[in-house]
Image (cartoon, rainbow, N blue to C red):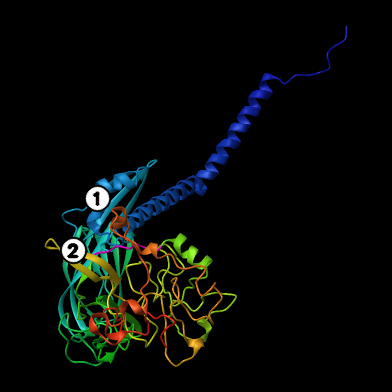
Amino acid sequence: MKRNKNKGITLIALVITIIILLILAGISIASLTESGLFEKAKEAKSVNMKAEMRESLQIAINELQIEKVGNGILDDITQEWANNKLKDYEVLVSLTDDNPLNVRKVVIKKSGIIGRFIVDEKLNIIEDDGIYFSYEVVENNGSNIKISITIIEEENGIRRIELPGREPLEYENNPKRIEGLDYTVQLGKEYIITITSGNGKVKKENLYIEPEIQISDIFINTYQNATSSVDKNSVEKGTNLLYVNFTATLDGNACAIEPPLTQPIIRNGTYTYTITGTYNGRIVTKIKEIKVNQYQTATNLVKYDAGEWTKEQIEELQSKKLYDLNSTHIGNNIFKLSDNSGLNFTFGGFTYKGDSTNENKDGVITSRNQSVDPESNAGVANYDGWKIFESEERDGKKYVLKLIHAGSPENFVYYRQGHGDAYRAEYLLSSGQRQVTYNVLLDNETIINPRNWDMYKDIELDKKGYIQDVHILVQDEVWNLEGNEHFEESARKTGSYYWLRNCLWR
């Protein structure tokens, strides 16, 4: 009988192997615990989650500003808003009665991790470390400012406060609130205040009181450096220009003003000026909004909405070579007709709503209701809007028969007498007569691709059948209007070099 030579593992050997593996596992776990890898992993998870929470809160605030067209305020940060915008989290929005700062506290929870944030008056997000710092000016002696400081640490209390130039303040009982702490600082100088809470957490606060730019009285007049303002609704637009006049100083030195005050104001509205100066090597900026209402409001204007330009309309004009964006409204020989570019002397400063490349440029408009400004030093468009050109009385009611744009036409006609054909563009885009020398788009003296003026129809009025025709006026339609012998004295006066001419007049 032969014996089996294959030996199996014994029970004792198996037990010993298991014991050794357990010992090694224990050593590994102990090593991981001692090195803090577990804690570091948990901390990394917490940091990432809090960053995600902050990003989600920032996106929600950005969406709020878009919805409010940039006018979102702190009162919009409500519990209901947070529940709607931050649905993936458990959120608590609060403003405690004992908080001297006008802020919102936002606590966000997810997967056992808590993120604490503060949203300030400007809707900036600040990490909430539980320490709140504020101050108010008590006395202003020019360069020296006396302030009263308030510090709150609601959870652990305050152990120490370090103010530059003073001995540190120590607190044995760790008070949660310190109010009325007097401190004197210099205007325009930065201070770092260090606060230590009861649990040893340290926070550094930057304290900087910015000097204020001083602005003189503001005057709006028809000449620069004026010391008085003309009355509201007293200046005829198109024949006079208005200028904003004021001075701005910082510590007695003149400040820079943008846009420059030498730039005239061509229509009523609210204008924003950025004023900058330097104090102790730091740039100080102030924004000033100034309302201009001195231009006369046009009489006999009516409500008429031709709407915004559309991308399709712009592309149609370009395809027919009836349009080429000229936002600077420059008039020179490069804008005459050529075989390659067609009507490339157009002075249109308009584009469609949503043209991110061009719609915010100076001199470019997106509305068909608004006038495009003439070229530099070529006058000023009288008015925006639509004026009654012809009407009649019937049955005690006034019926409007013809409307005309009250401002300068965007690129209809540009004319300079005596400059030669290179500078002359008569009766551009309609289907009327033009000089035969400009014959690229002509067939028997008729434009092959006339402009479609139907795009100027008020959509609602057109739906009701109130509009019969839309076209560009020629000189003959306004000449000698109401007995006037000169075109520029007629109802279609634009106050600029933009005229309505046809080729019959020299």
Identify the residue position indicated by label 1 in the image. 78
Along the viewing direction, whichever of 452 and 41 lies nearer the viewer: 452
Q: Using the numbered discs, state the Cα–Cα distance from disc 2 to disc 1 in whole angstroms.
A: 29 Å
Is residue 402 positioned above or below 258 on the image? above
Residue 451, how many percent across, how many down? 45, 67
Q: Which residues are magenta?
A: 303-309
Along the viewing direction, whichever of 212 and 306 lies nearer the viewer: 306
Task: Judge whether residue 464 is colored magenta.
Answer: no
SS at circle 1: loop
Residue 498, how many percent across, how many down? 37, 81
Q: Amino acid at mark 2?
A: Ile
Residue 365, how many percent across, how many down? 38, 70
Q: Main secondary structure of the magenta part?
A: loop
Residue 158, how many percent across, how many down? 24, 60
Is residue 64 positioned above or below 398 on the image? above
Identify the residue position indicated by label 2 in the image. 178
